Amino acid sequence: MFEMDNSLSKRNTPDKKFPKAVQTKESLVKNEGLQLNEKLIESGIRYRRLFETAKDGILILDFETGNIVDANPFIVRLIGFPLNEILGKKLWEIGLFSNKEESELAFAELKKNGYIRFEDMPIQNRNGKITEVEFISNVYLENKTKIIQCNIRDITERIKTEIALRKSEQDLKEQNTEYADLNTEYLALNEKLTKSINRIQHINNDLIIAKEKAEESDKLKSAFLSNMSHEIRTPMNAIIGFSEFLLHPGLTNDKLERYVQIIKASSQQLLSVINDIMDISKLEAGQFSVDSELVNINKLMNELFVTYKKIVGNKKIILIYSPDKPNELIQVNTDGIRIRQIICNLLNNAIKFTKEGEIRFGYTIQGNFLEFYVSDSGIGITPENLALIFQSFRQVEGTRENLNEGNGLGLSISKALVEKLGGTITVYSEPGKGSRFVFTIPYWHVTDDRITTTPKTDEYSWDNKTVLIVEDDLNNHSYIKELLSHTKARTIHAWDGKQAFELVKTHPEISLILMDLKMPVMDGYESMRLIKQIKPGLPVIAQTAYSNTDPRQKAMDGGFDNYLIKPIDRVLLMEVINNYLSNNFRAVPIHLEN
Ligand code: ADP
């Protein structure tokens, strides 16, 4: 172990007790030499102190041999050999290199480059303990002699820190990976959430639209109800009012006829409102069905022409009917009543919206379709309203002087009917110039000779025929009896289905039966089935009232030959009866279960 030589420093410290002597040139030179020497000694001591107290190991080697010539206390402690066992040894002998070759290789490189450095070198101490060190070796010139200085730094702590650092880096990385996984999961969740939000937004939008529609529909329905109330009250007022007038004593024939006409027209108006309400209710309930029967188109259109000519008679309107093939028998398998209803709706509108001018209607054959049209030179419809007018309860504001005239159902019912019949309806219109409504129905050329003979007028003559009227309501019975009286047909009356059956048995001359459905004792269905058992060829025609289930369908399914809807249309009643009595239509026996 080196010891610091304090005597040297003491010896060279100037003695402050003695006064400075007078100095000659020689003494000055001598003094300077002494001072330099003292300084050298001082710096030697200083460096020795640094060597002794350094926190790195320092070894001084002989440049030529590589033997250790000096070692500081730090390296002595590190390698565990006493200084005397270190001095004169080679580095590998004190555990600084693992073997001689390695040590010599390093020594040779050092000699060549004057410098070597091992960043991380394991050294083994006397007890076999391994310490990681940083080893730096330099060649210095000392008093013209080369020496080697090795600096050995214990880097155990640094390595520990590095390991800890690496570990925390690794942890961080792992955490990051975890976060990355979480991130991917989060992104996926986010995407799902965005999709859900979009879906909710869509649903929300749909709900808003549905809500607006419901509000709109509510508004329309309220308007419809107030219109309906007006539509029903107006004819009702006339009917009630003029019926009371009829009871006035001393009423002239002229007045009587006028009042009856008003009551009749108002009843018709009322009936058409009720029919519209029934139709739209059935359409909305999805219970609407149409019939299929052979319809003579020219006949139907001619009848409409006759009827509407009378209606426009006192207006400034010219009604023109132009059929495609007036002299041919155009027959279509369709629902004649519904076709008539659609054309009536269109003609009524044309009249309503044409103050003066021209209304044309007719049909053309377009391949497998019959195309009906009704055009007018009236007020027309704006393009934005064209799309709306087929919706229920829609009336275009400001199109007429009295908006309450009509209920806004005609066109929506017509559209639904046309579609049920297998066709389409379109409108072309120009405001101020007029409108043209066109609708189609499927057309197959039918050659059926059953409808070839049609009477020119409704003056039927059935003088050798007997009709059984089965009716529990006296007024209805009287009405039908009155109608048939002009035809010279004989009528028999039965109050219920059972009586009807008995009468059929005893009156073989009965040619046709008009059968009410709802009756006491025995209803119309039961009675018809019994009658058909004994007289399958006897036509039985049902008289049905409008109800929620389709009365016609029910009647036809039940086995009746035909049906008439109450209140009975006079023209239709005559037509139907005539078709059976003149054998145009034949009664069909029904399939009976027993
Ligand atoms: P309404 O009973 O009100 O006539 P519709 O459903 O038949 O009901 O018609 C709906 C609306 O379409 C009418 O209120 C009217 O504004 C318009 N419209 C229908 N036909 C015509 C026409 N020929 N000319 C002008 N506008 C018409």
Image (cartoon, rainbow, N blue to C red):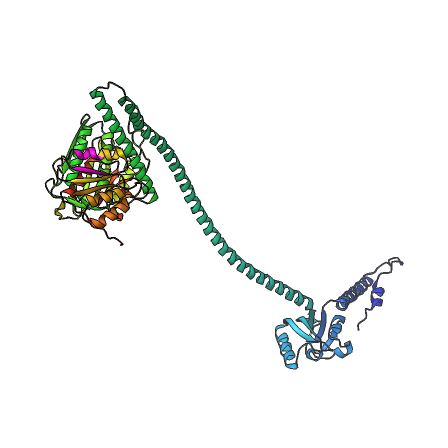
Name the side, left or right, on which 282 lies relative to 509.
right
| Residue 351 among those drawn in magenta | no
Location of residue 327 (image quadrant): top left
Q: Is residue 338 above or below residue 150?
A: above
> x%, y% of residue 125?
72, 76
| Residue 483 among those drawn in magenta | yes
> x%, y% of residue 159?
66, 67
Residue at the far front in the pictured view: 506
The answer to whether residue 553 shows anywhere in this view is no
> x%, y% of residue 558?
27, 48
Query: Observer-nearest residue: 261 or 472?
Result: 472
For the N terminus, the quadrant is bottom right
Residue at the far right in the pictured view: 17
Q: Is residue 234 above or below residue 428?
A: above
The answer to whether residue 100 shows anywhere in this view is yes
Location of residue 268 (image quadrant): top left
Query: Observer-nearest residue: 426 or 67?
Result: 426
Name the side, left or right, on which 454 lies relative to 221.
left
Q: Residue at x 30, y 33 (%)?
A: 273
Range of residues picked out in magenta:
480-496
